[in-house]
Image (spheres, helix red, strand yellow):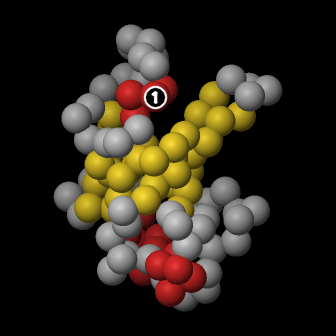
């Protein structure tokens, strides 16, 4: 789906399940991270996480924020790319200032 094709309320994302492009459940959208100066979505705050994907630090947190640029498609569910590979490759907890990483 082309994100620019039809304007939609960003609140419609809340409650949608998030899956990787290979079909692995990641979590559920709880909130949206916005850049008000640029009037754009920068991240999706997820809860109800797939605990097998995230580090112990993220498992103790309420949820994680996934960078919105990872979103490939939005429909009945949200599809994100390469999150599993990024999480499995990283042995260190994510740094909140790193935009390329999932943050807790």
Q: Give the SS element for disc 1.
A: helix
**x then y, percent, for residue 47:** 43, 59
Q: Position of residue 94 (x, y in %)?
A: 63, 74
Nearest to the observer: residue 15 or residue 37 = 15
Spot occupied by residue 2 in the image (x, y as percentages of width and height): 37, 23
Q: Left of 60 or right of it: where is 100?
A: right
Q: Residue at x 41, y 38 (%)?
A: 14
Look at the image and tell me whether residue 14 can be seen. yes
Classify residue 7 by image quadrant: top left
Q: From the viewer's perspective, is 101 left or right of 98?
A: left
Q: Is residue 90 visible?
A: no
Asked if residue 61 is positioned above or below residue 12 in the image, the reply reads below
| Left or right of 69 on screen, residue 52 | left
Q: Quadrant of the N terminus?
A: top left
| Above or below: residue 4 compared with residue 91 | above
Residue found at the very far top of the displayed protein: 6
In this figure, which residue is indicated by the disc labeled 1? 11
Residue name at image x 47 percent, y 79 percent? 59
* Residue in the image at 39% along x and 11% along y: 6
């Amino acid at each position: 789906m082309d994100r620019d094709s039809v304007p939609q309320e960003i609140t419609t994302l809340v409650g949608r399940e998030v899956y990787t492009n290979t079909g692995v459940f990641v979590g559920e959208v709880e909130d949206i991270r916005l850049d008000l100066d640029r009037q754009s979505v920068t991240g999706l705050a997820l809860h109800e996480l797939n605990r097998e994907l995230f580090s112990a630090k993220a498992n103790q947190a309420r949820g994680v924020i996934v960078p919105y640029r990872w979103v490939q498609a939005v429909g009945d569910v949200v599809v994100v790319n390469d999150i599993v590979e990024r999480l499995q490759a990283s042995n260190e907890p994510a740094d909140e200032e790193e935009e390329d990483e999932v943050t807790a």
